[in-house]
Amino acid sequence: MTNQPNFALSPADDWMRQMLFLPPRASTFSADIDHLHYFVIGTTMLVATGIFLAAMLLYVKYQRKPGVPRREVPHHPPMWFELSIIVVPLSLFLLWFFMGFRTFIQMETPPADSMDVYVMAKKWMWKFAYQGGPNAINTLRVPAGRDVRLLMTSRDVIHSFYVPELRVKQDVVPGRTSQLWFNANRLGTYDIFCTEYCGTGHSTMRGRIEVMDPAEFDTWVSAQRQGIALRQDMGGPVDPDELGAITMVQLGKKVASDQECFKCHTIDGSAHIGPTWLGLYHRNERLTNGTEILVDEAYLTKSMMDPMADIVMGYAPVMPTYQGKITAPQTAAIVEYIKSLEDDRIAQAPNPGPAYEPINTLR
Ligand code: CUA
């Protein structure tokens, strides 16, 4: 067993947590988010109490007394009072913004070596696929203490992935890849909720995340992969839509060939009707609109779903859309296949690194 971090909260911390009905903490983000939450709730309560007390005071002080004639309003409220009505809420808002900004940037920037899991949402279930297999429905197993990145897409409508204990929530959008990362540091099983209304089954769209001991997780993954290899050796049925039945790279190659991607894209580095896939991943490409982008999972997915959006300079806009033609898992598999086509010539050359690192690239 790993050494479980000490989860004993200070009495004040735990009291606040229970007052606000917050679940236990199970990720490295949890404490920061809770503390910001306490601060926001605390300051608003304080200000609200101040306003209430002032109102009571004025009510008593300026109450009309019997026998005393009604007076005109004695004088205009002082300038500082009127200003404070604007300045106090504004400065509170800015304070919260800057307090939360650091955590936000951290949550938006997955570490480069995080373990990727593909997530596909559909009415009304969650599908998970690991890069070398296996796949799973509604149960996501992750190792404790390791950075995990979820690359999420939806097959139908917008869903949203939410695990209260991890304090993470992210929309899952059809035709796009959205990312989310976390480091779960507390063993246990937690609920995954869908938090975007997605139809009559929305409330039943629940999954479980199992945070496992890292050693047990590794054993589980390799046992699953051996099972997959065995099924392949025995020539068992392989459902092309079934993530993990073969590795994602193998599946991606098959889907690309079925969809005739190779009529336009080569994998040997030579240019054809479209850009070559060799070394495409993490290459900087200049677009016809003059901007430069870093090819990542999100760009590759977008290119398949909405090919007219960002055309690489020097190529004609002739690619058809694959929205609706290939499923989300197949899209993810093609992305994995492209990622596997590393260009040795680039790998051996001294790496100048990307020209810039857009904040959204998250690598
Ligand atoms: Cu999926 Cu609500």
Image (cartoon, rainbow, N blue to C red):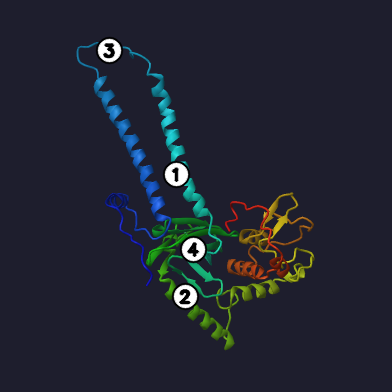
Instruction: From the image, tell me which residue sits under label 3.
Output: 70
Mark 2 or mark 4: whose residue is earlier in sequence: 4
Q: Could you say whether the residue bearing mark 2 is in a helix, strand or loop? A: helix
Instruction: From the image, tell me which residue sits under label 1.
Output: 99
Looking at the image, can residue 139 be seen?
A: no
> Disc 3 vs disc 2: which is toward the camera?
2
Instruction: From the image, tell me which residue sits under label 2.
Output: 218
Residue 7 percent across, percent down from the top left: 33, 60
Mark 1 or mark 3: whose residue is earlier in sequence: 3
Q: Could you say whether the residue bearing mark 3 is in a helix, strand or loop? A: loop
Q: Is residue 92 above or below residue 174?
A: above
Instruction: From the image, tell me which residue sits under label 4.
Output: 147
Residue projecting furthest to the top: 69
Mark 2, ligand 1, within 8 Å: the answer is no
Is residue 106 rendered to the left or right of residue 19? right
Is residue 46 rendered to the left or right of residue 324? left
Is residue 236 rendered to the left or right of residue 300? left
**Dot 1: within a 10 Å radius of its alpha carbon, few (fewer than 14), some, or many (20 or more) residues?**
some
